[in-house]
Image: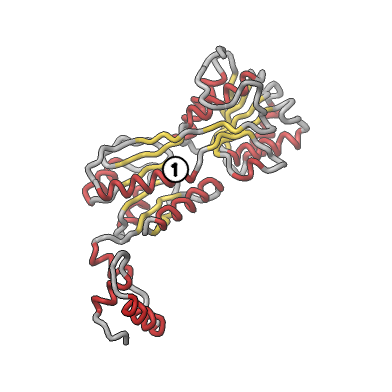
Amino acid sequence: MAGVSPATVSRVFASGSSVSPAVDGKVRAAANELGYRPSVMARSLARARTDLVALVVGRLNNPFDAQLVEELSENLDARGKRLLVVPADHGENDPAALVALDYQVDGIIVAAGHLSKASAERFLQLGVPVILYGREMHAAGVDCVVADNVSGARQVGALFRRSGVRNAIFLRHKRRTFSDDERGTGFREGMGPDATIRELQSSSAGSRDAAMAALSELPSVTGVFCANDLLAFGVVEAAVQLGLKVPDRLRVAGFDDIDMAASPFYDLTSVRQPPGEIASWVVERLLERLESPGLAVTTQRLPARLVPRRTAPALPGFGGLCVSDPGNGE
């Protein structure tokens, strides 16, 4: 219909190819009339690249996870690639990662659960780079990006200690995770050896009930640090129901600093880990690996910064940044 060869049509729709404005106009006009769109699958067969990147992810109950998916999608889209979301459970996620291979993806981002070294080695043999988010793994060809959980949680512990908290709870998920383990470690370091810290487990859905039971049974507790903001919201709600004034009677802090943390009802002290920076690093590293498969593996630790609010306000001279003292020294 446009009066040109198939090769010319291909050049019109190929990024970076040059054709005259007149030919470009004729081809696009014919495409509009015919309802024609280039076949991505056919192009991927010719280029041996699909421009698809798989994201193995669990349930998106946490707004932080949902925002990370959005940031990854936008970053990949800006670089000419598309995100393929592969649902997974919270256990060994080899099956979900292997499903991604069925779509001939260019790379895999694993943001839920575990990945075995056997699968990592298989991806390496196939030339499919793997980026692991939220945990460390020492395997060939697997890069990792993790928030500086220990430092962020240590800042919370130091703030609590300097506020007079000596009896605290660390509320974490019922399912053990790499991030929760690190956050518990950092919190203990910040609170110091003289503090009493009880570790409790809860699902996000049951955090308020778990907090009410704990605070009722442990009246001496004056601080609660939660592994994420959703758990912390449940603690604030429980404190309201029990008549415990926050922060006068109870100090509360979370982790992630999702948008709702700054809402007037919660006004939650939290540790911020920026999903935009995580997504940017992941995409950049993935593209680097596609160009240079032999790069040495790396683990990137991204800063986590304490954001004090009403539930655990900042003290004079305490900015919440880079707190390093694990004991009682200032």
Would residue 62 appear left or right of 87 to someone viewing this image? right
Residue 302 percent coordinates (x, y): 44, 35
Question: Of residues 78 and 262, which is closer to you in this image?
Answer: 78
Residue name at image x 33 percent, y 79 percent = 22
Check disc 1 and report the residue beneath it: 278
Question: Of residues 319 and 197, which is closer to you in this image?
Answer: 319
The number of callouts visible is 1
The image quadrant that residue 194 belongs to is top right
Residue name at image x 78 percent, y 32 percent = 243
Image height check: is 63 above or below 83?
above
Image height check: is 21 above or below 275?
below
Colouring of the image: secondary structure
Residue 201 percent coordinates (x, y): 56, 34
Would residue 78 appear left or right of 61 to someone viewing this image? left
Type of residue at label 1?
A: Ile
Image height check: is 265 above or below 193?
below
Residue 142 percent coordinates (x, y): 31, 41
Residue name at image x 66 percent, y 23 percent = 315
Question: Of residues 130 and 243, which is closer to you in this image?
Answer: 130
Residue 230 percent coordinates (x, y): 60, 41
The secondary element bearing badge 1 is classed as helix
